[in-house]
Image: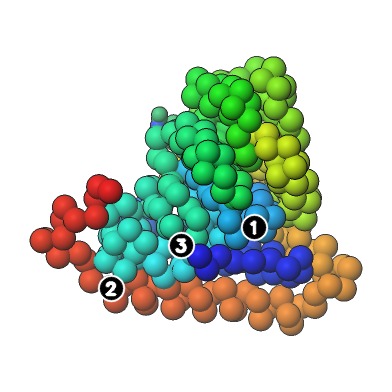
Amino acid sequence: MSVNTYDGRVQDLLQTMLLIRAYEERAAALQAESGVPGTCTSVGQEASAVGVVAALGADDLILTNHRSAGHLLARGADPGRLLAEVMGRRAGYCKGKSGSLHISAKELGVILTSTIVGGELALATGVGLSQKMLKRPGVVVCFFGDGAACEGRFHESLNLAAVWQLPILYVCENNQWQAFVHRRETMLGDSIASWATPYGIDSATVDGNDVEQVRALATEALDSIRASGRPFLLETRTYRLRGHFEPDDQAYVDPDELAAWRARDPLPRLQARLLESGQLDARALSAMESDAQRRIDAAVAFAIDSPYPAIDELVTDVYA
Ligand SMILES: Cc1ncc(C[n+]2csc(CCOP(=O)(O)OP(=O)(O)O)c2C)c(N)n1
Ligand SMILES: [Mg+2]
């Protein structure tokens, strides 16, 4: 498995966040300008993805949802193969047969992207059980949204994982939106983390727009899972700055709320902190931004260059 490893340098976290932002914005632009299939972007949620993935070890496994590009890129996915998949090209992670919504990348330990909301939660329980029965070392990390947490499957999955004592890190990326419905319309409380308590599961809430805090909390959670063999629920509070998918004019979004969360955009926040503390200078930052754009330019060229699968490949590799 060739996964990204992070040695603790905060500059590496920023570099990955810049890559994700550049990828997501290009994917949106390609949809608008060239009719490339639209994706559910994770713009605004980069710190949550990178903070958690940077805390993982090489053996850990990932299950994710429809908003998965950040998780995949943070784990070391090649942006060219990711875009090729979105475009239905043969060089994609699933040979162009998954699109953005069902990607699996075994070499990265990414078992599946589930587009069935909450599907990843039930699968994680099964993968956690298999890790335990086979005595494998990796923790299973399951990314899901606040919408998924409002489904019955969340409660069934956490209950079983607690009863069976499974090594699972549940990461609820609470981005305040569930497609076109605000979180306030589907839950009365403000805390998803607290829903773990009745099941006997430890939990924590973190500012999901602060990558260093996310990494610190995720590291603590993983340590606790490895020591106890029990699951943990981490809620990252963040915001979906773009629409549910592309295109989406966000006409249903309260502009004041959007502006308030834009002011907490994890990228400028981290950049300002690093510039102020002298861990980064303007030249280095500009070089990092150019590097991210260069990688995405190369990814687009790679994806466009890849052929579509041939007609006789239509039913190969679609069932294992
Ligand atoms: C079982 C199921 N119901 C409905 C949908 C349609 N749908 C796709 S994404 C989504 C919202 C999910 O919200 P959340 O879990 O908070 O994730 P987010 O999109 O905010 O990342 C819905 C309702 C679906 N894909 N699967
Ligand atoms: Mg959500």
**Could you tell me which secondary element the residue under label 3 belongs to?**
helix
Respond yes or no on whether mark 1 lies under 8 Å from ligand 1.
no
Disc 3: CA contacts within 10 A as few (<14), some (14-19) or many (>=20): few
Residues at marks 3 and 1, CA–CA distance in whole angstroms: 14 Å
Tag 1 residue:
57
What amino acid is found at the position of numbered circle 2 in the picture?
Ser
Tag 2 residue:
306
Tag 3 residue:
107
Judge whether 292 appears above or below 30 on screen.
below
Instruction: Residue 257: tell me if it is visible.
Output: no
Residues at marks 2 and 3, CA–CA distance in whole angstroms: 20 Å
Q: Which residue lies furthest to the left in this view?
A: 312
The quarter holding residue 66 reads: top left
**Mark 2 or 3, nearer chain start:** 3
Q: Where is residue 94 in the image (x, y as percent from the top left)?
A: 33, 58
Residue at x-position 47% and y-position 43%: 65
Residue at x-position 47% and y-position 35%: 126
